[in-house]
């Protein structure tokens, strides 16, 4: 009986550790893919407009689902992770499909017609969102750094 209990404890400990590694690697994947999406969107915006993104932008909110990422660049919190900042303003929206060569299907600075708008690609919120994640990156020393993530749940947003 003691061997059975010890074996069970060892097995459960290994399962918990493996689960933790899985979550850690999942965080890393979201951080890497989110950062890649942010950099791709910024690069394409700057290429098309010949302008840098504004210094006032201090956050990038990413909605991720499988290989599709949608990014909102803003000043202040959108209300997804905490109450919306009174100073909140969105400046740039970008949607892309990650693959060997990322493809941007939507890019807009909100000042008129979108800079890129490819028909036939739905937004993540219009798809099955059971495996979608909200991810926030905060700008520090001029770079966007992974801050936190949570499962997509628009009912929890605090607008």
Image (cartoon, rainbow, N blue to C red):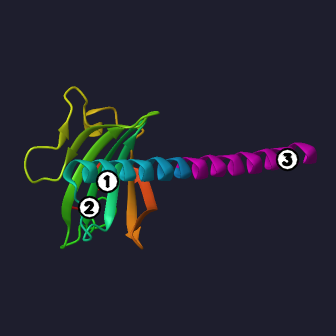
The part of the image, by quadrant, that contains residue 122 is top left
Residue 21, given in percent of the width and then of the height, sits at 65, 50
Which part of the image, by quadrant, shows the N terminus? top right
Which type of secondary structure does the marked residue at label 3 adopt? helix
User: Residue reaching furthest top?
Assistant: 120
Question: Mark 3 sits on what residue?
Answer: 5
Give the crowd class for mark 2: few <14, some 14-19, many >=20 residues within 10 Å.
few
Q: Nearer the viewer, residue 56 or 136?
A: 56
Give the crowd class for mark 1: few <14, some 14-19, many >=20 residues within 10 Å.
some
Which type of secondary structure does the marked residue at label 2 adopt? loop
Going from N to C along the chain, the mark reached first, 3 or 2, is 3
Q: What is the magenta range?
A: 1-26
Membership of 125 in magenta stretch:
no
Q: Residue at x 22, y 45 (%)?
A: 107
Tag of residue 52 = 2
Which type of secondary structure does the marked residue at label 1 adopt? helix
Q: Is residue 106 above or below residue 89?
A: above
Going from N to C along the chain, the mark reached first, 1 or 2, is 1
Tag of residue 42 = 1
């Amino acid at each position: 009986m003691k061997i059975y209990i010890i074996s069970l404890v060892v097995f459960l400990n290994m399962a918990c550790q493996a689960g933790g590694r899985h979550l850690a690697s999942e965080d890393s994947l979201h951080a890497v893919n989110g950062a890649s999406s942010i950099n791709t969107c910024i690069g394409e915006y700057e290429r098309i407009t010949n302008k840098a993104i504004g210094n006032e932008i201090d956050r990038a909110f990413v909605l991720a689902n499988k290989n599709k990422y949608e990014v909102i660049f803003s000043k202040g919190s959108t209300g997804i992770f905490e109450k919306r900042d009174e100073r909140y303003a969105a400046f740039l929206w970008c949607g892309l499909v990650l693959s060997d060569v990322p493809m941007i299907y939507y890019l807009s600075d909100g000042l008129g017609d979108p800079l890129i708008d490819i028909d036939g690609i739905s937004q993540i919120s219009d798809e099955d969102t059971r495996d979608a994640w909200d991810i926030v990156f905060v700008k520090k020393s001029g770079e966007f750094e992974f801050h936190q993530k949570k499962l997509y749940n628009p009912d929890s947003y605090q607008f």
